[in-house]
Image (cartoon, grey):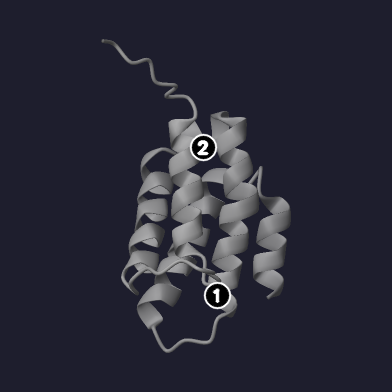
Amino acid sequence: VYYVFNIEGCPIRIINYLTMLSSPYLENVQVSESIRPTSLRIFNSVIESFPDVINNSPPILALFSDKICLCLLQNLMMPTDDLGSFNLILRIFFNLYATCRTHLKAQFEIFFNN
């Protein structure tokens, strides 16, 4: 028996799942504290490793421009003493700026004004 999988939607599903895990406002989901930094590290690795894929794929770029930027901004607004997470979020924004600055102008304006 052969199964046919739709692999086009897999990266989008994975990114949606990681966005949910890295959100500071998880409701009815119990995850350990190490999950949020791990998902943020995965985002950073994806941005560093595949900038052309992000820029040339409108659905993935839409996820980065909407859900991921919102999640990163929410994480920045959370009061915390963890400088490692703060550093990681700033690094993600810098990598997004280096790779997707032409597509994410409004998001960077919001980031720099906050």
Residue depicted at x 59% and y 40%: 61
Residue depicted at x 47% and y 86%: 80
- Residue occupied by mark 1: 76
Residue depicted at x 37% and y 68%: 31
Specify the amino acid type for callout 2: Ile
Instruction: Pick whichever, 35 or 4, lies toward us.
Output: 4
Q: In this view, does 61 lie to the left or right of 53?
A: right
Q: How packed is label 1: few (under 14 Cα within 10 Å), some, or many (20 or more)?
A: some
Instruction: Name the element at disc 1.
Output: helix
User: Quick check: marks 1 and 2 in contact, CB under 8 Å?
Assistant: no
- Residue occupied by mark 2: 54
Give the x, y percent position of residue 91: 44, 63
Residue with the most extreme left position: 1
Instruction: Name the element at disc 2.
Output: helix
Give the x, y percent position of residue 32: 33, 72
In the displayed structure, 34 sits above or below 39; it is below
